[in-house]
Image (spheres, rainbow, N blue to C red):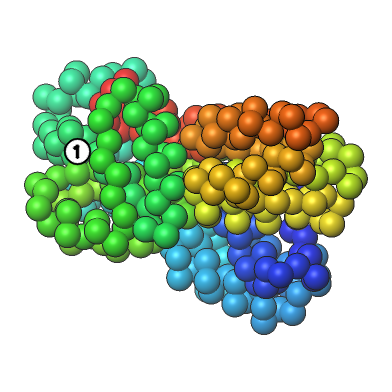
Amino acid sequence: MVRFRIQPDSEIPASNQLFNQIRFAIASRQFPPGHRLPSTRQLAMETGLHRNTVSKVYRQLEDTGLVEAQAGSGIYVRALGHEGGAKLRSPVFDTNPEAYDLVKESLDRLLEGGCSLSQARELFLGEVDWRLRCGARVIVTAPQQDLGVGEIMASEIEQALQIPVQLLPLEELAEALERMASATVVTSRYFIGDAERIAAPTRARVIPVDIYDYAEEIEFVKNLPAGSRMGLVSISPGWLRASEVIVHSFRGDELLVMTSQPNDPYKLAAMVKTVRYVGCDRDSFPKVKAAVAAAREDIIRAPQVICCENYIGSQSMNLLRRELGLT
């Protein structure tokens, strides 16, 4: 059961703490599509926040496209991309949505039963051809201010699927899509609302990926001795902010947490000399190890480095492989 914890003495505003914790729960599928979020009253009692603050956070989540309010029922996690089908629609079927739903349902059943896209092509030529055209151009996107998370996603996709990937800031996506006949846009569920709005007027489809749930890493953090000093290193500022909030939500002030990006050598060097444990993403790992090696003469015991190998969840990677016709 997902629990939310607010640190009243934190420099991070309480609403931001709750927003980031719920967003993480959604992005990591702890709150799957269709999941009903706690009522504002229930969440206010759990966190100690005012119901108006909880309502404000829910409105923010709705504005970003992660949840939707159903009158008289509650707030639910939205079904996006492959879950709802809206962004996977071929323009061929725009004039006949009922036919599209029938074709897509049938195609998904064939794929789930082991049929390849090539085998299904004669039956669903328009849909399959469109997917293949889009799959020929894969774009990974993230906001310019956190393009580091885009680099992480692009690197993992290229390595796992063995395909070329283009990385673009969200701010440049609209202009790029105008010049393309078709494309597949891949982004984290964190940014799905903006990506969908940008791609809506084009012939591109948008596929959101869920992030890895970090279950092993979270369990490790839960069992650290109180008073431990922990460092977090990532090329993504967003990853750092979210990770810091999640660590605080489990351990509060029991742990001293420091953060750094790998391209800040002075801060990174100071961190490895101070902390006992360092958590980092795969792209930051080489610089963290180099910083530890360089500081060997100045420290009695080198910090333990925990490298988080994945950002994209395995289920999302498998779905992406299928949608690109790589199965």
Is 278 placed left or right of 276 in the picture?
A: left
Residue at the location (79% across, 37% down)?
Answer: 276
Above or below for 271 versus 305: below
Residue at the location (61% across, 29% down)?
Answer: 289
Amino acid carrying label 1: it is Arg
Nearest to the observer: residue 39 or residue 132: 132
Q: Position of residue 211 (x, y in %)?
A: 52, 42
Above or below for 320 versus 34: above
Q: Position of residue 265 (x, y in %)?
A: 56, 45
Is 244 placed left or right of 117 in the picture?
A: right
Q: What residue does disc 1 label?
A: 137
Nearest to the observer: residue 105 or residue 196: 196
Q: Could you tell me if residue 299 is visible in this image?
A: yes
Residue at the location (80% across, 51% down)?
Answer: 256
Q: Residue furthest right?
A: 226
Residue at the location (50% across, 62% down)?
Answer: 67
Nearest to the observer: residue 84 or residue 17: 17
For the C terminus, the image quarter is top left
The image quarter containing residue 95 is bottom left
